[in-house]
Image: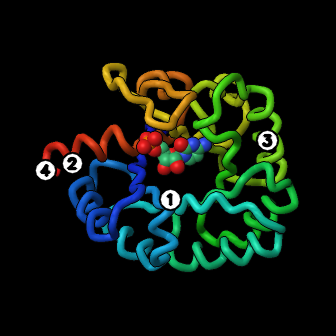
Amino acid sequence: MGNKIIIALDGMSEVEALRIAKLLKGKVWGFKINDLLFADPGIIKKLKKFGNVFADAKLYDIPNTVANSVRRLSAVGADMITVHASGGIEMMRAAKENAGHSKILAVTVLTSFKGSQNKIVLKLAREAEKAGLDGIVCSGHELKYVSKLPLLKVVPGIRPKGYNRKDDQKRTVTAEEAVKLGADYLVIGRPIINSLKLKHGK
Ligand code: C5P
């Protein structure tokens, strides 16, 4: 399977998100949203005209509550939904059972955390597998430790070599490194969004 790019549409208006999605239609696998979900979950339907939609809700609650949220996001067409792996196997199972056609991914350790997270990421990934989830979100640094697990690997914290800003990300890799290490999907936000803004004079 080819590696796929997901564009993170963070901290922008719905109008701006739809403008960027239209611009990148057909060039990327899809679009990831988080804060826009809180403005209007109906954004998922609108974005689907331009690609797949990753609802990065990062759900973390008791199984019944997570199941309810997953059902709503799935009903409006989210292709991928995230839950926190640290919410436990029972919660992850409940998410999967209520996911319909949506894929459920477990967020392991945020890429804004410093230092070696290999052990904890592997432990959480194993639990996600046990719960029957479709994949995990981890940084490129942990990919080699989870490569044997039959899970999709979605990798944020991608920074190009010449890009001299990490922003709030700590465990970053380049797109090339992530692909070589076995990422199935790359989540890229600011490095692409900022360059689009420059191009369009904003
Ligand atoms: O702008 P940037 O490329 O840093 O965007 C990365 C995106 O991936 C953000 O939307 C962030 O919320 C998300 N993410 C992350 N680390 C995780 C899970 C998601 O950076 N473990």
Q: Amino acid at mark 1?
A: Phe
Crowd class of label 2 (few under 14; some 14 to 19; many from 20; radius 10 Å): few
**Spatial separation of the CA atoms under disc 1 and disc 2:** 22 Å
Residue under pointer 4:
200
Return the residue found at the far right: 90
Left or right of residue 190, residue 125 in this image: right
In this rendering, the label closer to the viewer, 4 or 3: 4
Q: Residue at x 46, y 60 (%)?
A: 33
The tag earlier along the polypeptide, 3 or 2, is: 3
Give the image location of residue 56, x and y in percent: 56, 58
The tag earlier along the polypeptide, 1 or 3, is: 1
**Spatial separation of the CA atoms under disc 4 and disc 3:** 41 Å
Left or right of residue 111, residue 91 in this image: right
In this rendering, the label closer to the viewer, 1 or 4: 4
Residue 75, compared with residue 61, is above or below; it is below
**Spatial separation of the CA atoms under disc 1 and disc 3:** 21 Å
Q: Amino acid at mark 3?
A: Leu
The tag earlier along the polypeptide, 1 or 2, is: 1
Give the image location of residue 117, x and y in percent: 72, 28
Label tally: 4
The tag earlier along the polypeptide, 1 or 4, is: 1
Residue under pointer 2:
197
User: Disc 2 vs disc 4: Cβ atoms closer than 8 Å?
Assistant: yes
**Spatial separation of the CA atoms under disc 1 and disc 4:** 25 Å
Residue under pointer 1:
54
Left or right of residue 82, residue 125 in this image: right
Secondary structure type for disc 4: loop
